Image: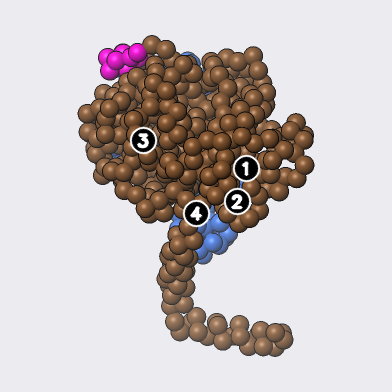
Chain colours: A blue, B brown
Amino acid sequence: MSNDEKPVPHATPESQPYWDGAAEGKLRLQRCAACGLVRHYPQLTCPSCYSSGVEWIDASGRGVVHSWTVAHHAFHPAFKQDLPYTLVTVDLAEGPRALGRLDSLSQDRLRIGLPVQISFPRNGQGVPLPEFTATA
Amino acid sequence: MSPLTAKALAGLRQLLTSIFPFRRLCKRRVALRVARTTKKAAKMSLKGNGAITGIGETAYRRASPYTAFEMQIEASLAAIRDAGLDPKEIDGIIPIGITGAPAEAFVMNFGIPDLRFSALTPMGGASGIAAVQCAIAAIDAGICNHVLIPAGRNVSSGARAGVRIHQMPQFHLVTEYELPQGAIAPAQLYAPMARRHMELYGTTSRQFAEIAVGIREHALLNDNAVMKKPITIEDHQASRMIADPFRLLDCSLESDGGAALVVSSSKAARDMRQPRVRVLGIGEGHPDSPSSITQRADMTKLGIAKCAPRVFEMAGVSHADIDVAEIYDCFTYIVLCQLEDMGFCKKGEGGPFVADGKLRRGGALPTNTHGGLLSQAHMLGMNHIVELVRQLRHQGGRAQVSGAEIGLVTGYGDMGDGAMAIMGRG
């Protein structure tokens, strides 16, 4: 983070399927192969039954807004051009949450419970990152 | 066990599993066992066994010419002198911060002949109180006698908080999934907690302002505070937005300096140099989903909610007994949330609770009498512990709460870790 480029995610063997999904525009989540619990962010074991068996599912990408913040100060020079931008925390239909940008057209409808849909536009570095759009 | 018996047992277990809902029973049994152990742990109490016998601080500045280690050494020598000890009498060290100088550096510089105990408590701003708990446990177990807890930071010459946290392993999920989207600094990571609180309970920015203004009033009484000018609610409301709902005056400072503590047994403290300040109750609490606020089931609840009932029970005091409070204040909202989580008011009532000046001088719960992280300096909450000891020794200067007998100090860090101590004079 020393230069003016946006920091890029460094995938791990554990998280690679998530980023592969993102590149295809799909939200992929880990589902426990033993008990079926869906979890996010990717991790080694299921916090419920401790199995490390994993199936990756294509999630619906639907959810509702849980909370948000609007960034007015760039804590990194590469984000100055984006100001102000909104980050929404979203309750996904499958259970876990995701964090992503809210698209500019949805800003004025922002509230807890706002139904949203995920997509994965590529940023300046070509990294597919989650963005949410209001669907109601 | 012979292989044959093992095989027979495995077969039997398989048979039983097929007949009984074994898994569900197992889960219930685990839950019961966890509850029982937790109860047992609460009975083995550290209540009143340890004391803070030495405190030391350097000057706090926006930018210091000294390195973090130089200031750590200066504060350590001040704390050891304050306790009436010689550095060679230190036989336990818990340095604050996992990337700073290790215990060995203090052994080298102080010529400590027999270090019997060292540890790390990586909980961000809750590390200091967690270290005190660790120190008292080690002393109580007879491992060592006098534990030094030194902190030092020079952040003006290095990276800002938004860069530093991403070098820490406990932030790796945020670094991979949230940082690339522009969720970089603590202000941005914590803001959704505050926003959710505001939306659910009607908490307002003016209520956050009251916290900032009250703490600034205290800072003006402290010669070692970075901020020197009074502020009003309107100043807060006019300060620029950083990460909605946090304005500039909701955010703590970035500061250089050092602070240190010496922890000893209460028995030893009776004959030491300073008026005795005992730790009556102490604990640490880790929130659900400690490595990701995004995934936390209830993001309006911090780790301190888990340890607060234990700490009050251990100390044997009630909320009304607290004469003075030093509450970790990296952001105004974090003060409000901790007040709720500690049970000073119900969840959601923190806004009205702080709005009537309770936290100010002469209020029912004078809070951050040194000026806190918001207006004295960001010394990872070590300055909060130092200040509580000062208040209970009645060495609080112009900010002294008259007749303070019992006080409380909290720590918060790394996205929600919490720690808390109740201390008493005498």
Mark positioned earlier in the residue sequence (3 or 4) = 4
Give the alpha-carbon distance from disc 3 to disc 4, as whole Å. Answer: 22 Å
Please, what is the three-letter code of the amino acid marked with disc 1?
Val
Q: Residues within 10 Å of mark 1 (few under 14, many from 20)?
A: many
Q: Are marks 3 and 4 in contact (CB under 8 Å)?
A: no
Q: On what subunit does the disc labeled 3 rest?
A: B
Q: Residue at x 42, y 23 (%)?
A: B397
Near mark 4 (Cα within 10 A), the count class, few <14, some 14-19 or many ≥20, is: some
Crowd around label 3: few <14 · some 14–19 · many ≥20 (10 Å)? some
Q: Is residue B144 left or right of residue B20?
A: right
Q: Contact (CB < 8 A) between labels 2 and 1?
A: yes
Q: Which residue, given by chain and number where applicable, does mark 1 sit on?
A: B147
| Image mark 4: chain | B
Tag 2, which secondary structure? helix
Q: Which residue is mark 3?
A: B404
Is A122 included in the stretch rendered in magenta?
no
Task: Check chain identity for marks 1 and 4: say if they share one.
Answer: yes
Cα separation, mark 4 vs mark 2, equals: 10 Å
The quarter in which the C terminus of chain B is drawn is top left
Whether residue B34 can be seen here = no
Is A111 rendered above or below residue B70? Answer: below
Could you give the CA–CA distance between mark 2 and mark 3, rounded to whole angstroms?
A: 27 Å
B240 is higher (above) or lower (below) than A52: above
Residue B338 lies, in percent from the top left, at 36, 39
The mark nearer the N terminus, 1 or 4, is 4
Q: Residue furthest top?
A: B229
Say which label, 4 or 2, has the lower sequence index. Answer: 4
**Which element type, helix, strand or loop, lies under badge 3?**
loop
